[in-house]
Image (cartoon, rainbow, N blue to C red):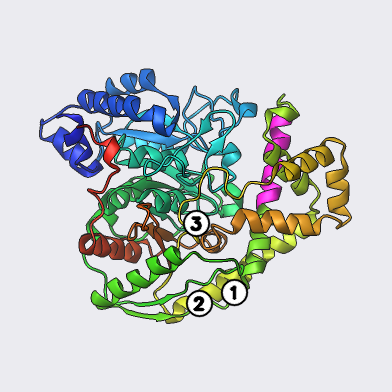
Amino acid sequence: MNVVEYMQRDTVALAEAIARGETTAAELLQLALKQSERTQPTTNAISTLMEREARAQLARLSAGPFTGVPFLIKDCAQDYAGLPTTYGSKALTGNVAAEHAHVVRRYLEAGFVIFGKTNLPELALKGVSDSRAFGRVNNPWNVAHTPGGSSGGAAAAVASGVVPMAAGNDGGGSIRIPAACCGLFGLKPSRGLVSSGPGFGEYWYGASSEGVISRSVRDTALALDVIMGSEPGDPFVAAEPGVVFANAVARDPPRMRIGFTTASPIGTEVHAEARLAVDTTVKLLQSLGHEVEEATPDIDGAALATSFLHIYFGQVAALVADARAKGAKRDDFELLTRVLATLGGAISAGALTTQLLKWNVFARALARFHARYDMLLTPTLAHPPIRHGQGDPTTAEQTLLDMLDRIGLLGLLTRAGLLDGMIDKIARDSLQYVPFTQLANLTGTPAMSVPLHWTADGLPLGVQFIGRLGDEIRLLQLARQLEQAQPWFGRLPDWVVES
């Protein structure tokens, strides 16, 4: 098998080729390493190469559905014993994992050969991937643009043909955003369906879920079969579907009623291409026999954004405080991380609890919507993949924030309510391009980005579907139906395919 043939197969097909004796795990690892060596200087998708560990895995491969297939994990919450989990931060380069995360163990038990960790923004905090510690990740479709975040390295690796599927996680859109930016399929599972342990019980209070970014729906379905399920000590046990996703996905979904909206929940602008992506998807759904009409949940989008950002700020403060207690220095963190940690530290326990309690309000409202509609369709992104640096604070704003933080005024002014306007601006700036994804995280519902649209400039722009809690089957079945109606697997950037 050569590199071109390797890129023409999804993960399931590669595993089948090994099982038939057409290739070997060692040969596939060499092909993945070769493609990575070729594309890494352009994408910077991989932050830590694990070739030595991968070759050791070859000697003790588990027998499973993915035996011998190369794979990448994300350098965030996906601990690999003996290696640092850095979260894209200089401050955490000494954070060596004592044991595998449950999800990593399950990937290994399924037979994957893990040969690297993918790049991300510091502490997985942004919808772009521009870590100071490991460098910026570039979108394979246009290197002047972001591949999204926080699983940006995973998406860039898949879109550049290094692997057909890579691990990600999603606390505010971090699987769906990069999938949408890179022309890939990305599913965020329901809360608790995949264990976050043993390092975490509910990562980000349960807003974050483990999953994958892939080029085919059946790959994601089989991966979910492998990684779902609770572990001893998990805070709660999510109901499992009682069926095999890989089998269920082969069947068409029933005729569904789908509500759609293209309006930003926080009142920001939605690009014409994002609206067009939804409009053309509506027509495709109707041609497949589904009932589609404009509708939206009765949810205050601004209130949801505020609730999300309180959690976001608070989690950053806790992570930074833990790292500082272990010896990290203040300047080991990037400016934005330091600012967010200060803002989070200025939030009272009562204010944080008030915002957490609102999650129930959002979940009930979305459930009322789902009593009428099987799914909610929105743009995944409000804008095509942005250029690097677009939306960043200005130099003057960064200088002011740095000064206020260094002299201790930032926290004091925040507690006094004197910086509410600036905080609102940070919130608006950070979510203006990605206002649609946080709903599924706070409500715990499954959601997916499906690559059904490319812009006039040739950039991918996915659409999002949010399903009922625990209804991954319908999402996967619909995705498979859309994939068959409008295939995307063979669509890769021209430069990544070896001539």
Task: Name the residue: 10% across, 35% down.
Answer: 20
> From the viewer's perspective, is 449 left or right of 136?
left
- Camera-side residue of 392 and 228: 392
- Camera-side residue of 281 and 9: 281
Vertical order, 281 against 30 (above or below):
below
Q: Are marks 1 and 2 in contact (CB under 8 Å)?
A: yes
Q: Which mark is residue 347?
A: none
Coordinates of residue 394 in the picture (x, y in percent): 69, 45
Q: Is residue 100 magenta?
A: no
Q: Which mark is residue 299?
A: 1
The CA span between labels 3 and 1 is 20 Å
Vertical order, 196 against 81 (above or below):
below
Answer with the quarter of the image where residue 338 lies.
top right
Residue type, label 2? Thr
Range of magenta residues: 312-325
> From the viewer's perspective, is 277 left or right of 323?
left
Residue type, label 1? Ile
Characterize the magenta stretch by its predominant secondary structure.
helix
Coordinates of residue 157 in the picture (x, y in percent): 37, 37
Vertical order, 315 against 372 (above or below):
above
Characterize the local packing of mark 2: few (<14), some (14-19) or many (20 or more) Cα atoms within 10 angstroms. some
Depth-wise, is mark 3 or mark 1 nearer the camera? 1
Q: Is residue 318 magenta?
A: yes
Characterize the local packing of mark 3: few (<14), some (14-19) or many (20 or more) Cα atoms within 10 angstroms. many
Q: Residue furthest front?
A: 457
Q: Which residue is mark 3?
A: 191
Depth-wise, is mark 2 or mark 3 nearer the camera? 2
Q: Which mark is residue 296?
A: 2
